[in-house]
Image (cartoon, coloured by chain):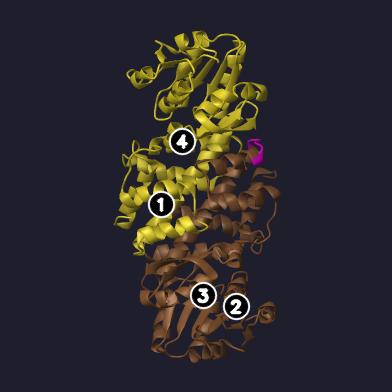
Chain colours: A brown, B yellow
């Protein structure tokens, strides 16, 4: 079994690393903010002092970090991954980043004689805990196959998307649809609420009809209950929609739906709901309609 | 068993009437455009010469007609339903119409000593054929219960929404979400296509992830295959989004997502795709990105 390095012990990363430990992989962990490793150490993980130290002791380095600039620091910093990476190693980056950065990382990793896969995930916090994530992967297909067991220790499905950067692109397109579906759900619920409908009945209609969606299943009850505990934060949703917008603009693709969804989550962020679940967008509509959804 | 009148033998109505006949109801049918009743007559239906004649011979009159003005004609015309309706009868209107018209119809029907339910459906053509429609119903709850068997001959679920007009309101809110989800799916697929992704792989990611939706299941493959045979026509989707917009404007609810989706389907209509499936919105994006999705 390859030795694993794991960098980024947030909402998604910590349970993913725990699942690798449960499948008996030797895992060395690192997190920029200290104090996140205690539970994993209890499961058998070693903690390293830097990304470099992680890379020096790992055949496979998995990273899942919240944004482009943090990813750059973890890779290119003085004590970064690239300074310690072993020839023949594989880097699996599950962060949601731009395709451009994914391609740049792939080139930098290749210079070290190692392989890079951009492998973002979908499945949210619950899927990370249950080990049912779906990985969308860009890079060399042979490297994907060689690391099949590592992926399947953390998830249930690997979808190969093509050359480096295509996993990142797939994730941004996927999350654009997530943001649009969530905003559309909440807007439809706001009209229904203003129209005086019973919201449980309306949600039942949505879930039983052509309007059914994963977002309706995940967020409908949260909106009705005013439960904005985080599955996927509004700030991260907004970040991904911004990246999707940059991607589309770079290819001159008109994206009216994405732009409006982005503006709505931007309004939620401006109101101070960034660290709540993206379902907190409902509070923006509730102010507009002057009542609880 | 009550005798049934059925008016509106279109994509949805014809299979709904057929399911009533298969459950051994005596059904008298009428359609504004002649020649639609032949198959139903083969299943045992009688054909009447006018909505009035249908109403005169029916305990329950079911209507499913494509728009507000056609509904008005069928109810209020010289040979309309209201001129023949029996006291104690029930009218079940499954058309997608405005809440205002539904409330006006309810009042007119009540003046004849009969009961009105606004009972639009979700489930599309396939659900109408399979008898798995979901009815969202406004009106007197006791009347809904009294007609339970009639509903369940055509569908699998009845969701009671409240007073007259609330079924219609629920349907418009539901279909606003349908339109937004469909437009968002197609937009996300357009970005992915321009980014060079394999579309089957991308659709698999969508269906396996947080972006999953009934619209992705129904329309994803149609878009990839360029199959715009009608499940739900683009023109009817546009009509419903316009009604949703009027409903929202009347209550001063801001609906940025709905408005953009409406404009996109309006663009599809302007390009001449109105009589194709709503998935033909993909052709608008394909012109924008200069390639097949």
Instruction: Note whether B93 is above or below A106 in the view shown.
Output: above
Report if the CB atoms under discs 2 and 1 are less than 8 Å apart: no
Q: What residue is shown with label 3?
A: A68
Name above or below for residue B60 compared with residue A29.
above
| Residue B152 on image: x %, y % | 55, 28
Q: CA distance from mark 2 to mark 3?
A: 27 Å
Q: Is residue B124 visible?
A: yes
Q: Quadrant of the C terminus of chain A?
A: top right
Instruction: Name the front one of labels 1 and 3.
Output: 1
* Residue contact at pointers 2 and 3, CB within 8 angstroms: no
The residue pinned by badge 2 equals: A21
Residue A194, quarter of picture? top right
Q: Are marks 2 and 1 on the same chain?
A: no
Q: Secondary structure at mark 4?
A: helix
Q: Chain of mark 1?
A: B
Q: Which residues are magenta?
A: A195-200
Disc 4 crowd, CA 10 A, few/some/many (<14, 14-19, 20+): many
Distance from label 2 to label 1 (Cα)? 40 Å
Describe the element under mark 3 as helix, strand or loop: helix
Query: Subunit of mark 3?
Result: A
Q: Quadrant of residue B46?
A: top left
Between disc 2 and disc 1, the foreground one is 2
Front residue of B198/A196: it is B198
Q: Residue furthest left?
A: B291
Query: Separation of disc 4 and disc 1 at Cα?
Result: 23 Å
Instruction: Report the residue marked by disc 1.
Output: B186
Q: In this rendering, do the residues under marks 4 and 2 share a single chain?
A: no
Residue at left 39%, top 61%?
B201
Q: Earlier in the sequence, mark 4 or mark 1?
A: 4
Q: Which residue is mark 4?
A: B127
């Amino acid at each position: 079994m390859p030795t694993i390095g794991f960098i980024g012990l947030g909402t998604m990363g910590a349970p993913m690393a725990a699942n690798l430990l449960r499948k008996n992989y030797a895992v060395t962990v690192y997190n920029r903010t200290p104090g996140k490793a205690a539970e994993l150490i209890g499961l058998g993980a070693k903690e390293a002092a830097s990304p470099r130290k992680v890379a020096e002791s790992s055949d496979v380095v998995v990273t899942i970090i919240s944004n482009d600039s943090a990813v750059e620091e973890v890779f290119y910093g003085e004590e970064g991954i690239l300074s310690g990476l072993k020839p023949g190693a594989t880097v699996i980056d599950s962060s949601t980043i731009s395709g451009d950065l994914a391609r740049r990382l792939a080139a930098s990793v290749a210079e070290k004689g190692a392989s890079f896969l951009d492998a973002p995930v979908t499945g949210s916090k619950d899927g990370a805990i249950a080990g049912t994530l779906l990985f969308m992967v860009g890079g060399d297909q042979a490297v994907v196959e060689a690391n099949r067991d590592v992926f399947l220790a953390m998830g249930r499905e690997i979808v190969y998307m093509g050359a480096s950067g295509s996993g990142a692109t797939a994730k941004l397109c996927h999350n654009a649809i997530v943001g649009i579906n969530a905003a559309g759900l909440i807007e439809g619920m706001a009209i229904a609420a203003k129209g005086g409908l019973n919201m449980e009945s309306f949600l039942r209609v949505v879930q039983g009809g052509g309007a059914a969606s994963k977002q309706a299943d995940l967020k409908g009850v949260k909106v009705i209950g005013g439960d904005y505990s985080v599955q996927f934060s509004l700030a991260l949703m907004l970040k991904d929609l911004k990246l999707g917008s940059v991607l589309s603009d770079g290819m001159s693709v008109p994206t009216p739906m994405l732009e409006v969804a982005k503006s709505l989550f931007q309004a939620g962020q401006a109101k101070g709901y960034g660290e709540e679940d993206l379902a907190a967008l409902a509070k923006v509509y509730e102010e507009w309609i002057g009542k609880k959804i």
